[in-house]
Amino acid sequence: MINLILPLFIMQFGYASITLDDGHIIKAPYVQQGAVSDTSGFILKAGDMADIQSSLHGNSCLIRVSEIKSRFELETESRVGRCNERLDVFRKSLDESKILTENLQLELKEERSKYKTLLIGSVVATVALTATSVYFGTR
């Protein structure tokens, strides 16, 4: 009975309207089976149109938005986790580099100290040998 009422209702007005939540109305012209249309497009069955209408006016949009938001949050958490893992690797490498740099600076200070000691020793030895040579040479 409903199948007969809906096509008769549509035939009376010549189109079926779909009202969106924001108030926008889409008018779908009625085309009889076998008719030739002067425009190209898609044809919706009356049942499909009712499904679209009910999905636009129900909680389905909120459910879809909620699902998209939850998927986005999961993807964001996953990416943040991967970034944190990579950052931890970089931080560990940076810490190792800092320790290596400190050790190298300590070794450099020790080498400079040894260099100064050897320089002072060679200067003293050179002065002593020169003084000894002069002393024995002038004698």
Image: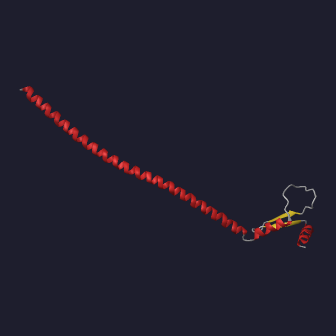
Instruction: Decide which of 39, 107 is in the foreground and name it.
Output: 107
Q: Is residue 87 above or below residue 73?
A: above
Q: Quadrant of residue 13?
A: bottom right
- Going 55% across and 59% down the picture, which residue do you hit? 80
Instruction: Decide which of 114, 38 is in the foreground and name it.
Output: 114
In the picture, measured across the screen, residue 14 lies left or right of residue 79, that is right
- Going 20% across and 36% down the picture, which residue do you hit? 122
Spot occupied by residue 65 in the image (x, y as percentages of width and height): 68, 66
Q: Residue furthest left?
A: 139
For the C terminus, give its image quadrant.
top left
In the picture, measured across the screen, residue 111 lies left or right of residue 129, that is right
For the N terminus, give its image quadrant.
bottom right
Q: Is residue 63 above or below residue 40?
A: below
In the picture, measured across the screen, residue 85 lies left or right of residue 57, that is left
Spot occupied by residue 118 in the image (x, y as percentages of width and height): 22, 39
Q: Is residue 89 above or below residue 123?
A: below
Q: Is residue 126 above or below residue 14?
A: above
Spot occupied by residue 45 in the image (x, y as percentages of width and height): 85, 63
- Going 79% across and 68% down the picture, which residue do you hit? 53
- Going 14% across and 32% down the picture, which residue do you hit? 129
